[in-house]
Structures are given as C-alpha cells and as structure tokens.
Image (spheres, helix red, strand yellow):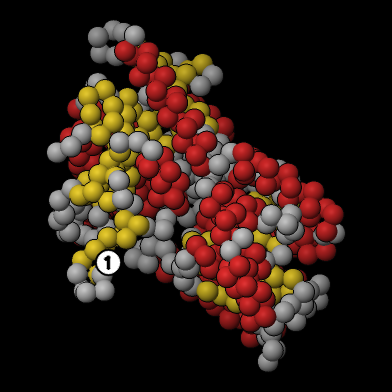
Amino acid sequence: MPKADLVVVANRLPVDRIQDESGQPAWRRSPGGLVTALEQVMQKVDGAWVGWAGKPGLQVDPFDFEGTHLVPVELSEEELEDYYEGFANGTIWPLYHDVIATPVYKRRWWDAYVRVNRRFAEAAAEVVDEGGFVWVQDYQLQLVPQMLRELRPDVVIGYFHHIPFPAYGLYAQLPWRRQVVEGLLGADVIGFQRAADAGNFQRSVRRILRYGTKRESITIPQPDGTARTAIAKPYPISIDAQSFIELAQDPAIRARAVEIREQLGNPSKILLGVDRLDYTKGIRHRLKAFGELLDDGRVEVGDVTLVQVASPSRPGVEAYQELRDEIELTVGRINGDYDTIHHTAIRYLHQGFPREEMVALYLAADVMLVTALRDGMNLVAKEYVAVHADNRGVLVLSEFTGAADELTSALLINPHDIGGMKDTIMRAIEMPVAEQSRRMRSMRRRVLENDVERWGRRFLADLETFRDSRRR
C-alpha cells in the first residue's frame, strides 16, 4: 500500500458511490462542507483520506481519486446504527449542542464507538508515512488520536473539532468523559472553532485529569515519568471564498437569481434561510418570528417572502422525523393563513441543491437569516457574504454561531428572544443602502482574508512545528 505524508481521517470519504451513464458503479466528489474545506489542502500535498465509503457492508479496496489516495473503512448496518446514529448523533451531538435535545447514554452505543474508532485508527496507521502527519476530523472520531499514538508514536497528530465543545457542567454528564478527553489528548494539535470551545476543553482536562494548562498548552504526563505538550486553540474554519465570488460573477447564475425573484412574484424583499434540517439550527424560532410579523401586520405577504431551504438530515433518527413534521405543519399553517393566489408567505424546500443554485439564491436574497441555537461555525453566513460583491444585502446572525466572532458587522441576535428577532428582521428589511454597504464591506474583507486555504495553512503550520521540534 502506498504511504502518504498527510492522512486525513474523517467519518466519510470525500466521494459518493453512484452509477455512471452505462450503469456501472462510479465515484463522484461529495458536496459536503468538510470536503470543500479540505479540498484545497489535499490537492497540494501527497495525501490520503481514510473514511467510510457511504454504504453499510460495502467492501472496496483503496483507490485513487483526483490525486488523493482513498482508503475505505467498512461499517456494518448495526455499527452504523450504534456508532453513528447512536453514540455520535444520539449522545455526542445533543450533549455538545447545549442539550437542546436530550442526550441518550447507551453502553452498547459506546462499545460500538470504541470499536469503530479503533478500525479508523488502524487504517490510518497503515497508510501514513514514517514521521508523517495524520489530521483527524470531528466528533465521530474523538478516540482516534490516542489509539493512533499507541500504534504509531512516530507520527504527528492533529484533531479538528467542527462542532461546539460544551461547558464542563454539561460535558460532565457523559459517562465516558475521561476516555473521550484522553482520546483527544492523543493529538499534538487540537483545534476548535471558537476560543470559548478551546477554553471549555481545557477546563474539562483540568477538572477530569488534573493536567496542567497554560494559555493554549497542555502538559500531559507520560508513563516513563516525562511529559509531552499538546496545544488546544481556535482555528475558525472558512470557505473557498474565491470560488463563490467566481460563481457569483457567472452570467447564467446572475440570470437565475433574477428568475428566482420573478418566480416568487417579485416581492420587495426576499428573506432566506439555508440549513440542514436539524434542531440546532433554530428553524422553528425563525418561522415563529416571521409568522408573528405577518400576524402583527408589520410585513405583508406580497411585499416580503421567506424562502426556507432545509436539506434532509439523518432521516433514520426519530428526533429528526419529528422536527420535519413540526416544521412542515408550521409552514402549512402560516401559508394557509396568509397566502394569496399570487404570493406565498413561505417557500419551503426540503431538498439539497447544487452550489450554483445556492449562489443564485444568495444573490436573490435581500436578507440572510442564520438563527442557529448553537453552531460550531455556520459557513452559510460566510458564503452569503462572499457572493455580494455589490455590498448589498443584510446578514442576521445568531450570536451562538462561531461566525459571530468574526462577522461582527452582521445584525447579531439571540434566537431565543423572539421579540428581539422580529425587531432585528424589521431593521434588516428597512436598512438603508449606505448602512448595508458599510456592514457588508467589513464582513467581506474578513471572509476574503481568512479563507479556507489560510485555515488549512495555519493548522498544518502548527503540526509542522511539532514535527520540527521532535526531529531536533
């Protein structure tokens, strides 16, 4: 098996299994945010990617795809249910998102999580070159760094946590809190979206393991009486801003944006929400605020339309099925009360769209509503900002997103405060062009300066520092 200097380990491979025009199995690059974020990084190195192939029981040998060596990890139907839908998304996801939904703690789920994490660690250990880098991604694989360190003490290990890390008072609920912290501390560099997340992690290290921390450094005692140092700090992730700018300049996409406005009946203002269908995204709160604005007569259905894209997410999990039912019931009720023959109050789209269509929607929208109750970053906010080279448009942004730390010129809201959200939406609708321009110009500067390539460079530079010090 060929060896790679940089190995990315993620829950999924960066490709989807499809059938080509002749009906033969083939691979297509996935549209997910993680794939997009790491695409540029992987193109510039001798890299490999370890991940699940996307279908339970699918046995595939390692193969090359667009310059990257892909190493599939097999998962059974039962493992997918217990490790992924169970522990990762029934335990960790709600716990790490401020217990917006109730976490479930099942020992069977934990056992599957340990078993699958070990399989990923073994696959990475097989493919990484002597003294190379391994970069583990996200909450599904929190045990991999320590398992990998035991297998390959010669490699430098990074871990990036894409979702929030909770305050100790919440994290302490986890029956396996010690094992997870020890798993993460197997990495040399532990990255988070926000400074607050890194601080929460360090507090958990101090409370559970009694290890010393100083600024971003953590001192980890070793069995031989020595100690090693790891760092835990924020690396806010971003987007490939230039690719969004280029798409926004495409005449066909700009024409599509005009067509979208016409298809919506040419309202004065279009509000847009773009989310995975997830209880953390605050879609219910957003719909409640908009429905009340219609009730109050502060907006009229012919003048203002809300477009809500809710891409399907984890349909096998009961909580998500219930959320979909609730949202669609709310949309139906509001539309039933306020629609006219010519205009719809809420255009609800429970489907995913290609990037070109999303850019057209961003261009068509006067106001972007990002009302997440808790979010690691939220790249939709940055995508909306990137495409508006005319400096028009208003971003209404939850203060509980990582993006709020950077996009401080957005209209920041507490999504739990429905009255405050309603007032802020009205302020966005009525905002003068000069104020829109000033705010958007400031946010675009930040997004263009801190793009995804810079994010990858910063993280890999810190890994390189560890490798240099180890060699010395």
- Spot occupied by residue 319 in the image (x, y as percentages of width and height): 42, 63
Q: Residue at x 65, y 41 (%)?
A: 446
Q: Looking at the rendering, which quadrant does residue 267 occupy?
A: bottom right
- Spot occupied by residue 327 in the image (x, y as percentages of width and height): 54, 71
Residue 130 versus residue 431: which sits nearer the camera?
130
- Spot occupied by residue 23 in the image (x, y as percentages of width and height): 21, 74
Q: Residue at x 46, y 71 (%)?
A: 351
- Spot occupied by residue 350 in the image (x, y as percentages of width and height): 49, 72
Instruction: Count the labels in the image.
Output: 1
Crowd band around label 1 with a 10 angstrom C-alpha radius: few (<14), some (14–19), many (20+): few
Give the quarter of the figure containing the N terminus.
Answer: top left
Residue sitting at the far front: 251
**Depicted 235 relative to depicted 424: above or below:** above
**Depicted 58 relative to depicted 115: above or below:** below
Q: Looking at the rendering, which quadrant does residue 426 occupy?
A: bottom right
In the figure, is residue 76 to the left or right of 14?
left
**Depicted 348 relative to depicted 83: above or below:** below
Give the quarter of the figure containing the C terminus.
Answer: top left
In the figure, is residue 179 to the left or right of 368?
left
Q: Residue at x 30, y 46 (%)?
A: 67
Say whether residue 187 is visible: yes
Residue 309 versus residue 63: which sits nearer the camera?
63
Residue 224 versus residue 8: which sits nearer the camera?
8
Q: Amino acid at mark 1?
A: Ile
Which residue is the site of mark 1? 18
